[in-house]
Image (spheres, rainbow, N blue to C red):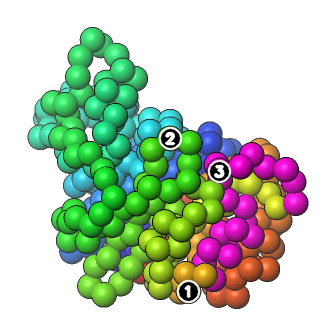
Amino acid sequence: MRLTVLGSAGSFPGPESPCSAYLVEADGFRLLVDFGSGSLSSLQRYAGLHAPDAILLTHLHCDHMFDAVLYVVVRRYAPDGPYPALPVYAPAGAPDRLSAAYGDDGSVEDVYQFYALQPGTFPIGPFAVTVDRVNHPVETYGVRLEHDGRSLCYSSDTAPCEALLRLAQNADVFLCEASYLDGIDNPPDLHLTGREAGEAATKAAVGRLLLTHLVPAWGSEAHTLESAASAYAGPLEVVRPGASYDV
């Protein structure tokens, strides 16, 4: 598998990054995991406008799905379009949510073929995909992708929870959010700190920790890295748009 980061900023686009979007490739198949605000630009820069063969939206907050609304124009009104409906795996409310955001008094189901997520394992292209509900205020799924004996876990947005540890168990790469700073009074049941991401990585015995979903305007990358390193002794870094990793 190959992971390419298209966007990694938390909650809203930062000065150097769009919001969450990650392209995972194997056997010529490209799965776009989340499609957050601003990431359509990065999709064109690092992969191609029509690169995705399927999309998985972990939840329906705008910083994880809003460019799927803009992508309707790309597929519906292209000079050589319209394109066939693209598979989208997402929480059950996705068709209504995307249609409402797009407006135009119509459905987006000519552009997307929706499949409602629920906890369990299922195939998408060459990947064995496992999802489970994690600790976030709206219906949100952490994701584990497996292919050819290798595994990638993505936390999505979550506070500490057992589901995250199950998904990450022995993963070769753990792409984990670290939105909050340690040492301050953060809202409960919403996001992880760097230390909490490191603790989850250690408990799950992952091979590599990649930190994402930092909020540049409110945080400190150095503080987050230091906090994560205090709880996890393995290789770790903060991801950036355009970075690619072999899993």
Q: Residue furthest front?
A: 162
Is 168 in the magenta? no
Label 3 sits on what residue type?
Asp
In the picture, the quarter occupied by the N terminus is bottom left
Mark 1, residue position: 205
Disc marking residue 189: 3
Left or right of residue 68: residue 27: left
**Amino acid on which disc 2 is placed:** Val
Apparent side of residue 171 relative to residue 103 in the rendered image (left or right): right
What is the secondary structure assignment of the residue under circle 2? loop
Image coordinates of residue 14 in percent, x first then y, are 66, 44
Q: Position of residue 16 (x, y in %)?
A: 65, 50
Indicate the position of residue 30 as horizontal and vertical percent values.
28, 62
Q: CA distance from mark 2 to mark 1?
A: 28 Å
Distance Cα–Cα, label 3 vs label 2: 11 Å
130 is higher (above) or lower (below) than 202: above
Q: Nearer the viewer, residue 47 or 10?
A: 10
Q: Residue at left 30%, top 50%?
A: 117
Badge 2 crowding class, 10 Å Cα cut-off, few under 14, some 14 to 19, many 20 or more, is some
Report the span colored magenta.
Answer: 183-202
Q: Which residue is mark 2?
A: 138
Q: Nearer the viewer, residue 49 or 60?
A: 60
Query: Callout 1, which amino acid?
Result: Ala
